[in-house]
Image (spheres, rainbow, N blue to C red):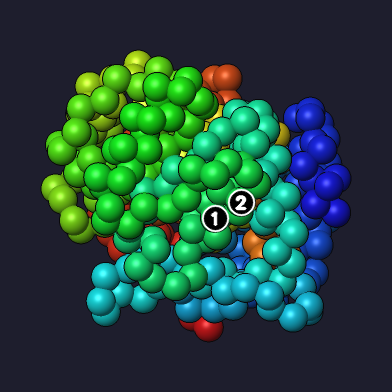
Amino acid sequence: MIEKITAIQSQQAFKERALQTFKHQFKENKLYRSFCDLLYVHPSDVNALEEIPFLPIQFFKTHQVVSSTDQVQQIFTSSGTTGIQTSKHFVTDLTYYQTSYLKGFEHFYGAVSDYTVLALLPNYLEREGSSLVYMVRDLIKKSQQFESGFYLNNLDALAATLTSLNEKGKKVLLIGVSFALLDLVEKYQFNLKNTIVMETGGMKGRRKELIRTELHSILKEGFGVSEIHSEYGMTELLSQAYSKGNGIFDCPPWMKIFTRDTEDPLSILSNGKSGGINIIDLANYNSCSFIATQDLGKVNHNGSFEVIGRFDNSDIRGCNLMVL
């Protein structure tokens, strides 16, 4: 199934697969079925993507969101401060995740074996259950480059490796959390020629939050690069969107973004209007492919999107439809 999903190339193929996935998850996912029933939505009445109900992402904090009876192979958990309930993604078939992130990376950047992959993800490495660490660890392995690896707090060693690889003219992917990348450029100045610097977002409570343009400006100057790339993913998804600069993200062909009205969560907005981000991730076949996130954003007319913030309130409107 995942091979058919990642082989999608057209909007029509996406629509057909999404409607089929909706029918499957309506039937197999008890939680999602209950949510749809409360909205009086049945697959027989749904003919457009916009008509499919999007499950509020908070349910991943309180329920096991699965559309399969297979044994759970992996539980991915979100990061959270002490006392904050974290999301749990129960994955019954890891090949869906592995195929999705590898095909997604290849779609935007080509073969991972062309890169030396350096990861600066201290806050993720310091806890169990990070789906990002799982993905990056596999990319490091598949890069088959001796220098590829994780860096925790050893910024000196990372700086030396970046400088050495730059002098050798090797293609490098440096993927890091924002606060750690800032720590690095505050200590060292680079002039990287063949390196993609990719931030995964967030200060994770380590630093004052910066707006994207300010963050990227500091990082571009510090690394000596013309653009800062970004990765957009989350615990509850099995696919990622990527930005090659200016905070404009593109999805792989099996993932699509909508925005919803912040006052009417069941109303999908037209492109160009800001609202809550809804995601269709067809790789999430064994969980829920239709998720209403807590992010705010805007979908451009060509299908790309921007993330402009998060909801101030901790609960997305719509969760109160269900008391389970």
Which residue is painted at 78% across and 78% down in the image? 70
Q: Secondary structure at mark 2?
A: helix
Please give the residue where the numbered disc 1 appears in the rendered image.
Answer: 137
In 3D space, how far apart are the residues under numbered discs 1 and 2 (Cα atoms)? 6 Å
Q: Quadrant of residue 176?
A: top left
Residue 53 lies, in percent from the top left, at 62, 55
Q: Position of residue 129 (x, y in %)?
A: 49, 70
Residue 26 location in percent, x, y?
75, 65
Q: Amino acid at mark 1?
A: Arg
> What secondary structure is found at the residue carrying circle 1?
helix
Residue 150 placed where, x, y %? Answer: 43, 53
Give, as a three-letter code, the residue at label 2.
Lys
Could you say which quadrant of the image residue 226 lies in?
Answer: top left
Disc 2 packing (10 Å; few <14; some 14–19; many ≥20): some
* Quadrant where the N terminus is found in the figure: bottom right
Q: Point out the frontmost of discs 1 and 2.
A: 2
Height in image: 84 above or below 153? below
Image height of 303 relative to 51, above or below: above
Residue matched to label 2: 141
